[in-house]
């Protein structure tokens, strides 16, 4: 085995792309990031699209620049891996050429669901309380919109793929995807890690013909060698193996060292998530799948707060003008300034509780955000703290649900995502969950996870436990205050957990009223 091997890893996000040289200790020998000037464009309100080769061109430019300044290290690179945003799709022709722009996961276009679900299946879905959720899934599936609104293009579509498959093709000439990338609006059987059969009950929600779906390989398998054409574009030596990895969230969970059921990964990102890693498949919420984890013998049941730490940006934009000015005077970020302001506010924000459903989920399609408990002593900083607490309380609810459904007990949390850079956020999370919250040596956990896959595949490490032992260092841990946890537990049991059932009829009435008044 080569001494001090490196993996060239790409992390392709919604707002930026990163290229990294990762060594076997989990260190970055070099890293370069490009923030997109235009992360996506909207031809119509709510749409989110990008040009077909935008992401490949971005990583190619980054790779050339990184490798040019590390010529002495290129011989140490043993493999390439990439991790990517989820549920972002392309239509390819018979020559694997894009037929239209990419549709991103952020896209809000809606297919017409009227009469599209067979009546007997619609009745079955309604019987188990999933009728409206299935219709929402149908409307949100980009393939259904394409079939209805661009039928000629759909007829020309030979393959309907997610972004990683196309990037794999651009790098190796092989159009395959990793099973651990199959998270989105596609006809995938999550439990059995394969495409759905034609006659499966929920195939009607996204009925992409089997011949339009690409081949799948397990994470850790070699997709193919880097081609001469890709080498010319990226500077990556031709012949290096490209190793199949997994989605950004899946790689982040692995990179945070969560491969056993007594740990969970919490991601304080635009979408806030909590993932477990378990061997036995279970639904984290009724009728919601657990996703295939990057380690091929595991699943990642996930609980999401869809607008998550986007709400921090929303708060600053709507209410934080004065805080922005004060932060600028002191030469710190607005988030850092706000963290200082909320440190002294007591847990529970003086009885101000927030339900963070600014965007509803699949299992609660009519849910709305709610703020209850306002009093005359509350300030905008109480509201800011209540946002963080509300997100954490909802994730705590998710963890409690998953523990009951899996009969597993989580003893420690590992935090990632932009929000995890805040000590205050991590301490609030520790206090809400009553569990230690740890951060690792880097915020680039997704890249660490993607690199681990290649190191294990190339035999540098025997397995993922071995890779974690060498590549993940615990930077710090936030111990919960039992006194604060007692307060949060009281608020959760007495107030927060009571909000959804009490608000449900009101939220349904709001949705019906909106429909009547917008038709």
Image: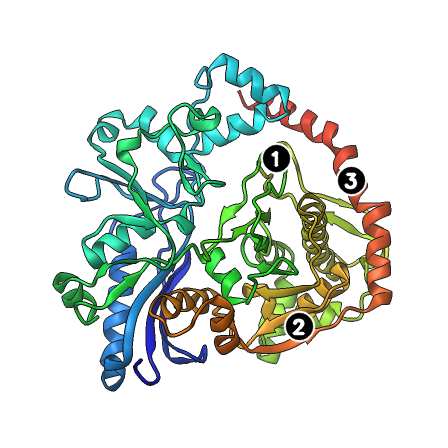
Q: Secondary structure at mark 2?
A: helix
Q: Using the rendered image of the protein, determine whether residue 345 is visible from the camera's viewpoint.
A: yes
Q: Position of residue 52 (x, y in %)?
A: 25, 49
| Comes first in the chain, label 3 or label 1 | 1
Q: Residues within 10 Å of mark 1 (few under 14, many from 20)?
A: some
Residue hosting label 2? 423
Q: Residue furthest top?
A: 119
Q: Residues within 10 Å of mark 2 (few under 14, many from 20)?
A: some
At 31% across and 29% down in the image, what residue appears?
209
Depth-wise, is mark 2 or mark 1 nearer the camera?
1
| Comes first in the chain, label 2 or label 3 | 2
Residue hosting label 3? 499
Could you say which is closer to the camera, residue 210 or residue 362?
Answer: 210
Residue 454 found in image quarter: bottom left
Q: Secondary structure at mark 3?
A: helix
| Comes first in the chain, label 2 or label 1 | 1
At 38% across and 46% down in the image, what residue appears?
88
488 left or right of 124 in image: right
Depth-wise, is mark 3 or mark 1 nearer the camera?
1
Could you say which is closer to the camera, residue 354 or residue 86?
Answer: 86
Residue hosting label 1? 363
Mark 2 vs mark 1, CA separation in Å: 32 Å
At 55% across and 24% down in the image, what residue appears?
518
Q: Secondary structure at mark 1?
A: loop
At 27% across and 34% down in the image, what residue appears?
212
Q: Residues within 10 Å of mark 3 (few under 14, many from 20)?
A: some
Q: Quadrant of the N terminus?
A: bottom left
140 left or right of 210 in image: right
Mark 2 vs mark 3, CA separation in Å: 29 Å
Could you say which is closer to the camera, residue 304 or residue 459?
Answer: 459
Q: Position of residue 307 (x, y in %)?
A: 58, 49
């Amino acid at each position: 085995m080569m001494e001090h091997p490196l993996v060239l890893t790409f992390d392709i996000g919604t707002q930026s792309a990163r290229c990294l040289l990762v060594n076997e200790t989990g260190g970055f020998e070099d890293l370069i990031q490009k923030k997109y000037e235009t992360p996506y464009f909207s031809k119509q309100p709510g749409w989110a699209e990008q040009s077909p080769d935008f992401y490949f061109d971005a990583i190619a430019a980054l790779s050339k620049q990184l490798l040019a300044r590390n010529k002495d290290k290129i011989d140490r690179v043993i493999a390439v891996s990439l991790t990517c945003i989820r549920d972002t799709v392309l239509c390819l022709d018979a020559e694997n050429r894009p037929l239209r722009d990419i549709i991103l996961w952020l896209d809000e276009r809606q297919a017409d669901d009227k009469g599209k679900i067979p009546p007997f299946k619609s009745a079955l879905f309604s019987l188990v309380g999933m009728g409206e959720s299935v219709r929402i899934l149908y409307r949100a599936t980009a393939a259904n919109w394409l079939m209805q609104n661009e039928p000629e293009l759909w007829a020309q579509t030979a393959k309907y793929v997610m972004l990683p498959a196309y990037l794999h093709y651009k790098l190796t000439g092989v159009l395959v995807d990793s099973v651990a990338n199959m998270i989105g609006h596609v006809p995938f059987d999550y439990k059995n890690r394969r495409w759905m059969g034609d006659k499966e009950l929920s195939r009607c929600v996204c009925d992409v013909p089997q011949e339009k779906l690409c081949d799948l390989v397990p994470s850790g398998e070699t997709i193919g060698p880097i081609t001469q054409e890709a080498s010319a574009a990226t500077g990556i030596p031709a012949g290096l193996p490209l190793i199949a990895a997994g989605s950004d969230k899946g790689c982040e969970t692995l990179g945070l060292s969560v491969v056993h059921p007594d740990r969970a990964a919490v991601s304080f990102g635009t979408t806030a998530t909590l993932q477990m890693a378990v061997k036995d498949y279970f639904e984290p919420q009724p009728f919601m799948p657990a996703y295939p984890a990057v380690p091929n013998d595991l699943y990642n049941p996930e609980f999401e707060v869809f607008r998550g730490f986007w709400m921090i940006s929303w708060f600053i934009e709507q209410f934080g003008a004065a805080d922005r000015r004060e932060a600028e005077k002191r030469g710190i970020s607005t988030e850092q300034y706000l963290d200082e302001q909320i440190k002294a506010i007591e847990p529970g924000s003086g009885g101000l509780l927030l339900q963070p459903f600014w965007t509803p989920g699949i299992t609660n399609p009519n849910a709305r955000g709610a703020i209850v408990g306002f009093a005359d002593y509350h300030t905008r900083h109480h509201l800011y703290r209540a946002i963080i607490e509300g997100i954490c309380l909802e994730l705590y609810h998710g963890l409690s649900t998953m523990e009951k459904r899996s009969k597993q007990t989580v003893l420690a949390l590992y935090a990632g995502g932009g929000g995890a850079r805040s000590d205050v956020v991590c301490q609030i999370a520790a206090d809400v969950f009553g569990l230690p919250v740890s951060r690792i040596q880097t915020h680039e956990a997704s890249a660490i996870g993607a690199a681990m896959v290649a190191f294990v595949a190339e035999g540098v490490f025997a397995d993922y436990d071995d890779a974690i032992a060498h590549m993940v260092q615990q930077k710090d841990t936030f111990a919960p205050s039992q006194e604060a946890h007692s307060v949060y537990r009281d608020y959760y049991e007495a107030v927060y957990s009571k909000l959804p059932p009490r608000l449900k009829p009101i939220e349904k009435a709001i949705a019906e009223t909106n429909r009547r008044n917008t038709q």
